[in-house]
Image (cartoon, grey):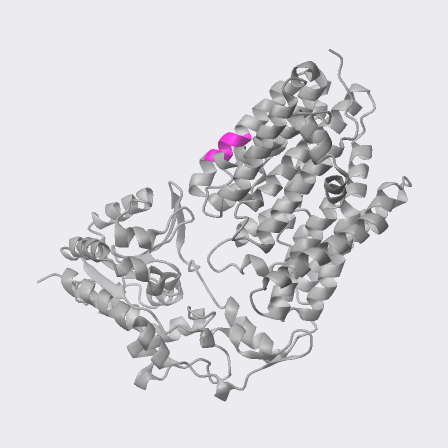
């Protein structure tokens, strides 16, 4: 059967409308559309289908040109992107604080180089800024598509030139990418989410379909309406049943992607495709779906930042309306005219403008361009948020079976094993300092925190077996003579519900007791925490006007409130320690003499990087109470030993 050239299909724009509607519903009303993030996966399948079709048709007609292909991609992608990025940059300069604006510059540079997914991948972690403060966060998916646009034409060109099987090549790449995705998502979910290697299979599904509609059109004409109905059902299930807790992409991503495959495979002549997806309203939304995707997220982010609170339902509806209006104007006034302009100067100008924005981003990142809200004292306060060091510079970075841990030796053949979450990580700078100052008098340190794939602290408390490999490493270390002590700490309030259950208290006690038979065990309670400690709470004013720092004298820590929050929890932890033979270390005794907890130093710089963690410099100076955990048995008390 001769290959067929694909014409414009309104139903695909209708499917785009479903995809963008799902994404926007997830971002604005996440409690109702918990799986709406799968709209991005639908976009990937559509892009793979259309781009592969364009390339296949051009190569079949012996008129394919890499230069022409990339020129068309620039006309399609860059106009709306440049407008949205420039507007976001200007508004960010006006309302963002210095550190936020600097991060915006970093993300702008990444967006200009279509590397946002890699930057977000590196940033992801406990102390990464919340996603709803990153106006360019959503450009990760565009970066993956651009990476696909760069590589896929080269692969197809080689396949055609060497007369190799297109379908076989596409299926092979899809299978390898899907296999990588399934394996990696179990141990490194952040990598699986942002890596192009674990996402290309979704675009390849579209590529497979592009081949089939050109060579198996007769077969695809059967049961078209049924396939479309099943595809929409799969998409609906993924939107309403999946949530953030799902191991995604993984196998779950098959629901929206196979659903999109089935819908597109039904062609534009099936009843559902023709009358439901192809109706003017759906098509109209689909036509503006790209600028709508670009606009909605920065508008939502800035609305939250400017209002300084959770958005009301009315606020969220206003965000949607503003996004639709701006998307329509961008499509009619910018995107469509430039796409229809065939002068060679348009792609050149668009490419130059994108490079210029990238240069501006680097200048912002380097501090050459400052936020409107710049203020020396504010900058000093915000600097506390970056005063953090984990892992310590001198430590060895290890990864076994997907479990990440750090090891810093001393001159002694002995180690203290530190287990916990970010509350353990905040002590890394003090641990490193002590080992370097007294290498012949201190144990080395092994630091094992919560992992991407599981909550290690919860597993230690409950014994549920979620962190199989990490717990296996702990058991191995406990069996070694060189491990002389174990210290456990966490943001205990996070685990309050678990610790108040008697069965978990019993398991936690038995776990510590089994260690205390041969090693020193230390249970470290919480440091003072509270919103008044966070640098971000030390400002007054409006982002739309002026922001000034609060007088130092007005910043007080509510010790009584802190004590009340932790009273019952501390009693539980002390009972567990007493029953198991562990030694309790209470940081409050050292950090808050006479129940007065300092918030800033003499120069007015915050002592905490956020509401719950000390800065690196403060931890080095004040967290001397953990020094005992690094003392070898000859000089330190070995808990549980006679």
Q: Is residue 318 above or below residue 610?
A: above
Report the residue that reaches farthest toward the left: 642
Q: Is residue 233 above or below residue 513?
A: above
Residue 631 as seen in the image, left or right of residue 371: left
The quadrant of the picture occupied by the C terminus is bottom left
**Where are the magenta residues, as a range?**
177-182
Q: Quadrant of residue 55?
A: top right
Residue in the picture at 63% in, 59% down: 316
Q: Is residue 291 above or below residue 220?
A: below
Residue in the picture at 68% in, 51% down: 111
- Return the x and y of residue 380 as percentages of the image width and height: 56, 76
Q: Is residue 205 visible?
A: no
Report the residue that reaches farthest toward the right: 343
Q: Quadrant of residue 338?
A: top right
State whether the magenta stretch is mostly helix, strand or loop.
Answer: helix
The quadrant of the picture occupied by the N terminus is top right
Residue in the picture at 80% in, 48% down: 331
Is 296 one of the magenta-colored residues? no
- Return the x and y of residue 256 as percentages of the image width and height: 57, 36
């Amino acid at each position: 059967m001769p290959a067929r050239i694909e014409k414009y299909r309104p139903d695909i724009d209708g499917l785009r409308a479903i995809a963008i509607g799902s994404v926007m519903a997830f971002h604005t009303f996440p409690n109702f559309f918990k799986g709406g993030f799968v709209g991005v996966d639908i976009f990937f399948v559509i892009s793979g289908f259309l781009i592969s079709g364009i390339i296949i048709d051009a190569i079949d007609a012996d008129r394919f040109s890499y230069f022409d292909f990339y020129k068309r991609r620039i006309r399609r992608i860059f106009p709306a992107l440049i407008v949205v990025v420039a507007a976001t940059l200007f508004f960010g300069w006006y309302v963002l604080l210095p550190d936020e604006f600097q991060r915006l510059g970093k993300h702008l540079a990444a967006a200009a180089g279509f590397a946002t997914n890699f930057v977000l991948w590196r940033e992801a972690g406990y102390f990464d800024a919340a996603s709803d403060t990153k106006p360019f966060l959503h450009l990760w998916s565009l970066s993956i598509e651009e990476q696909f646009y760069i590589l896929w034409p080269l692969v197809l060109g080689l396949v055609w030139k060497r007369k190799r099987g297109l379908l076989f090549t596409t299926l092979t790449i899809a299978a390898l990418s899907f296999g990588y995705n399934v394996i990696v998502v179990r141990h490194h979910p952040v990598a699986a989410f942002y890596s192009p290697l674990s996402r290309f299979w979704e675009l390849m599904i579209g590529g497979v379909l592009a081949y089939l509609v050109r060579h198996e059109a007769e077969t695809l004409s059967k049961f078209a309406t049924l396939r479309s109905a099943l595809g929409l059902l799969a998409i609906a299930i993924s939107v309403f049943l999946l949530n953030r807790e799902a191991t995604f992409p993984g196998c779950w991503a098959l629901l929206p992607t196979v659903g999109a495959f089935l819908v597109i495979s039904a062609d534009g002549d099936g009843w559902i495709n023709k009358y439901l997806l192809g109706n003017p309203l759906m098509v109209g939304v689909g036509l503006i779906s790209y600028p709508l995707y670009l606009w909605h997220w920065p508008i939502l982010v800035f609305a939250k930042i400017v209002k300084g609170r959770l958005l009301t339902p009315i606020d969220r509806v206003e965000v949607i309306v503003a996004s639709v209006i701006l998307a329509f104007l961008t499509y009619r006034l910018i995107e469509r005219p430039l796409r229809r302009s065939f002068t060679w100067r348009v792609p050149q100008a668009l490419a130059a403008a994108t490079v210029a924005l990238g240069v501006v981003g680097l200048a912002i990142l380097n501090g050459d361009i400052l936020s409107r809200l710049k203020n020396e004292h504010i900058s000093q306060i915000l600097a506390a948020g970056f005063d953090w060091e984990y892992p310590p510079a001198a430590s060895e970075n290890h990864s076994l079976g997907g479990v990440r841990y750090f090891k810093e030796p001393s001159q002694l053949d002995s180690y203290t094993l530190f287990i916990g979450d970010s509350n353990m990580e905040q002590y890394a700078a003090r641990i490193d300092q002590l080992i370097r100052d007294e290498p012949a008098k201190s144990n080395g340190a092994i630091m094992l925190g919560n992992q991407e794939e599981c909550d290690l602290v919860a597993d230690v408390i409950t014994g549920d077996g979620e962190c199989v490999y990490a717990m296996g490493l702990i058991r191995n270390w406990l069996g070694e003579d060189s491990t002389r002590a174990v210290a456990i700490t966490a943001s205990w309030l996070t685990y309050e519900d678990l610790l108040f259950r008697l069965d978990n208290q019993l398991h936690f006690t038995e776990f510590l007791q089994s260690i205390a038979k041969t090693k020193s065990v230390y249970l470290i309670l919480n440091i003072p925490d509270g919103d008044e400690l966070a640098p971000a709470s030390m400002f007054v004013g409006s982002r739309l006007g002026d922001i000034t720092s609060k007088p130092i004298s007005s910043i007080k820590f509510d010790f009584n409130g802190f004590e009340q929050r932790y009273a019952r929890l501390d009693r539980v932890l002390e009972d567990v320690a007493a029953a198991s033979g562990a030694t309790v270390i209470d940081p409050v005794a050292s950090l808050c003499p006479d129940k007065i907890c300092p918030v800033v130093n003499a120069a007015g710089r915050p002592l905490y990087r956020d509401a719950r963690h000390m800065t690196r410099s403060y931890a080095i100076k004040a967290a001397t109470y953990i020094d005992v955990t690094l003392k070898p048995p000859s000089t330190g008390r070995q808990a549980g030993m006679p």
